[in-house]
Image (spheres, rainbow, N blue to C red):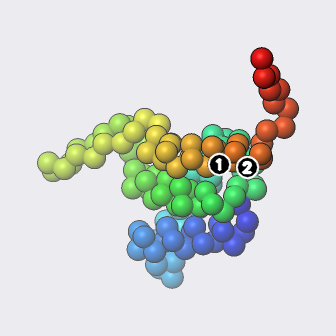
Amino acid sequence: MAPDTQSEILSDVQTAVGIDTTAAAGNENLSQLKLYIKLASKSVALYCGEQYDALPATLSGVVTEMALAKFGKRGNEGKTSAAEEGLTDAWNVDDLAPYMSQLNAYKDNKTQSGAGTEGLVRSFD
C-alpha cells in the first residue's frame, strides 16, 4: 500500500478510536494500531493474491475496518468471546470472515478485468 494510503488508514483508525498521539498513552496505542494495520494488510494481501507492500488503495476500507476490529479485541486475542459485568463480546475465529463479500467482489473484479489471469489455461471443449 502506498505510504499516503497507509497514513490515511492510520489517521482514520486513530480518529475512530479517539487516540490523541500527543499524550503518552496515545503513543503506546499508536504502536498497537500500526501493528494491527500491518497484520490486517498482510491478511488481505494474502487472500486477494496481492503483494503486501503494493496493496491497492481500493482495499483500504477493509484494512481500516479489520484494524479497528483487532484494536477492539486487544487483550482477548485467541478467544472467541469475553464477558465482563453482564456484557459479552463475541468474535469470529477468522478475522477475514466479516469482509468476505468485499474481498470476493474485489477478486471477481480483478479477474474480470483480466488482471491476475497470467498462467491460466482455458479449454473450450
Q: Quadrant of the N terminus?
A: bottom right
41 sits left or right of 98 in the view: right
Residue 94 in view here: yes
Quadrant placement of the C terminus? top right
Q: Residue furthest top?
A: 125
| Amino acid at dot 1 | Asn
What number of labels is visible? Answer: 2
How many neighbours does mark 1 have within 10 angstroms: few (below 14), some (14-19), or many (20 or more)?
few
Work out whether 75 lies above or below 94: below
Q: Nearer the viewer, residue 63 or 59?
A: 59
Name the residue type under label 2: Ser
Residue at label 1? 109
The residue under label 2 is 113
Q: How far from the left and from the top, in percent, is residue 33? A: 53, 62
Instruction: Please provide percent x and percent y for residue 38.
Output: 62, 54
Q: Horizontal placement of 15 versus 120: left or right?
A: left
Q: Residue sitting at 80 percent across and 22 percent down? A: 123
Q: Which element carries disc 2, helix, strand or loop? A: loop
User: Which is nearer the eye, 1 or 71?
Assistant: 1
CB under 8 Å between callouts 1 and 2? yes
Q: Which of 34/113 is in front? A: 113
Residue 61 occupies quadrant = bottom right
Q: Which residue is most to the left?
A: 86
Residue 30 appears at what percent x and percent y? 54, 67
Under circle 1, the secondary element is helix
> Which quadrant would residue 82 be assigned to in this image?
top left
